[in-house]
Image (cartoon, rainbow, N blue to C red):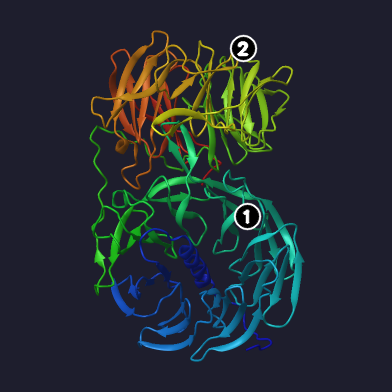
Amino acid sequence: MTMDGWTGPKIVNVTIAIFVFLATLLQQDAVGAVSRASAAFSDDGRLLLVQMEELAVWDLESKTLLAKIPDLPCRQIAPMKQDGWVLCVGHSVAIYDWKNRVAIATIPSESREPYQLLAYSRESDQLILRHGNEAVSVWQLGKKLIPLKHIALDQKKDLSAVAASPDAKQLAIAQGQTIHLYDLRGTAIHDLAVDGIVRELLFAPNSATLAVNVSRAMLFIETSGASVSARVMLPSAEEGGGQATRQFFSRDSQRLVVESGESSYALLDVSTGKLVALTEVLYEDHERGVKVPSHLHTVDISADGDYLVGQSDHLSTLQIWDLSTGTMLPDLCGHDCRQMGPRVSLLKWSPTGTKVVVMLQGGLNPEMDGKVSLWDVSAHSPELVLDPGQSQAKVLVKRQMPQDSVPMVSPMPTPAPAFVHAMVVRAVAASPTANQLVTVSDDGFMKVWDPGQGMLLRQLKLLVPASALAFSSDGAILAVGTAQGEIRLWETHSWREFSPYASQQGRINALQFLPGNRFLVIAGEQPHVLVVDLVSQALVKELVHISRSSGCVGKTCAKKRTVQGEVVEGLNFLDGTAWLMTISRSGRVVWDSRTWREVEKPDGMPDVWSSLGWNQPHIWTTTRARDPKSMTLAIWDPTHNKLWAGLDTFTHRDTEVDHGPPVGLGTAIAVDAQQRWAATRVGEHVSVWDLSTQAKRKTFHVRTPSHLHWTRDGKHLIVSTLNRKILVWSLETMAPAHYLRDPSVTR
């Protein structure tokens, strides 16, 4: 079967190769009770090929089923250059002309392992197949399949990855720490040694770059000279340690999306190797007050590399993330996907990125249960149901936005994008003594705002992006924790910087000043919390957060303590007391800052509480309402050990986004410094309360809100959001005042 050499012009269109690669990903990620499914679009997006029990060809423009092809099980599908021809790869390989209902050619099964389509070039009409761990073969297609090359794989060596270029001219085989780069047009083989075991290989659509994952690093190799052009360390992921498990090039070959661990996606610039943005798939655990990683079961990435659609463990729905900013966009499947669990077997972006093909089982809409549907991304609504049992697709009426049960005021429109940073915002802090707000982002800038005036007062460029902020109780000092564990300190009157402190904690999760401004509590990626004397830079105390969990032996249940300390993700201190609270994913621990002993339950505390903080001598928490299915946002007075105010009553359903996917945004509360006004947030509904009468004065709607802050004078409420926007709401007019906006940030 071996034949030496072939030549062909450089491929013009590699879009199909990208689709084939994504189809492979879908096959690997599909889980649940539904049958295996795969799909592929034509270049113009008009034709859609869907493999379920049989292969179906749909014309999306006329909404017509063009053909059904039985007994053609395809794990990977690719429309071919010949009109009506489709390449079907599974345990065998078949070329089928669906227009004339005739099989053109086949490659029979050779082993128990299915074939894997590594590349198909429409220009040269050649394909590259992998035969398990046995061999890679190159074929010329047409009315007769012609074998061109057969490259045996050495099973005695550690074979870790195999990839082919989209133009079908190059093959890369990784064995241990060596990459063998084959020129399939001749006999040349370039060997490239790398520092570490190669885990993944992927060619760019232009075939000029090869991405190589080595441990926690990504290498970009220029294939023409077999040389490394750029190298970047992947962001650390707690579960996966930064190891890449999925990679995808944008259609223009300029950016690479890398799954780092199981719950984060890094967007890399190919030419420089720099990190553009990091998207963390997180779920907010409202009972514990922390955000936890959420693994995506089924994933697809748009052809431009800007957007990811996936189904997460905790959201149990279909969600979209903006990979260029790292933000979550509630823009796809809401009510129709509720309670479906991990039962999505197909997600597929259209070539233009305006549509998504979905196959789900178990949603609440019986019209789509177990069928393939086409969704309009901008309308957040299903358009078509593609039932192969019907000759025409079923056209669905676009879902209407739900009507709110309370009067709403929408934030004022803005003539230009009102972004505060160019990348995802990591932390927001309001000064307790001045009407100032500080924001930090992955773009490496720290910005100081006058939120009432909507003015950007100061901008500082940090060498390393910041991840945490904390003001001292008098607002005189601002502490900034970076992604590399350094603590930087500023005096906020003159913005003179003090000597930094190297915590050796990795990415800083939270900071908290103690009374007197001398001692700072630092929580990072290490399973211990530091208490540092900022004057002497000496370590005063090292706290080990060990949460309690219930365990049962026979019929006896007791609280058990975990053996090892846990990573702390949040810190709180109650004004006027000695109580410091550390928060991990599994629970809270309260410490007496005078003795640094753990306190089981301080006097005056309710059984459950959610937040503490400077200038907040009260605790906000949730209590049971009269309805056993409901909860009430409440303010607790620890001095008198009683409930001070009961505000919003809500159910779990109320905390979810209702106009799109059911994203659990949870609840939040903030009280102004004079304890005259409170703001509560339930999902996307923000309410302002007069605490003297405990009456709700106004409710308004904000898209994907996160935290609430009051300015020091109590005149403005600040609502930070998940999409890099910060709304300033006026108490005087009881209406939105403006969004904070940096004019230099347009996207």
Q: Residue at x 58, y 68 (%)?
A: 205
| x, y percent for residue 739 | 44, 34
Q: Please state which of the two labelled residues, at mark 2 or mark 1, is closer to the viewer.
A: 2
Of the image marks 2 and 1, the number of the one nearer the N terminus? 1
Within-10-Å neighbours for mark 2: few <14, some 14–19, many 20+: few
Q: Is residue 52 above or below residue 438?
A: below
The residue labelled by disc 2 is: 516
The residue labelled by disc 1 is: 269
Pick the front one: 542 or 679:
542
Observer able to see residue 710: no
Amino acid on which the number 2 mark rests in the picture: Gly
| x, y percent for residue 610 | 43, 25
Disc 2 is placed on an element classified as loop
Left or right position of 665 against 181: left
Disc 1 is placed on an element classified as strand
Pick the front one: 498 or 288:
288
Quadrant in which residue 442 is drawn: top right
Quadrant in which residue 40 is drawn: bottom left
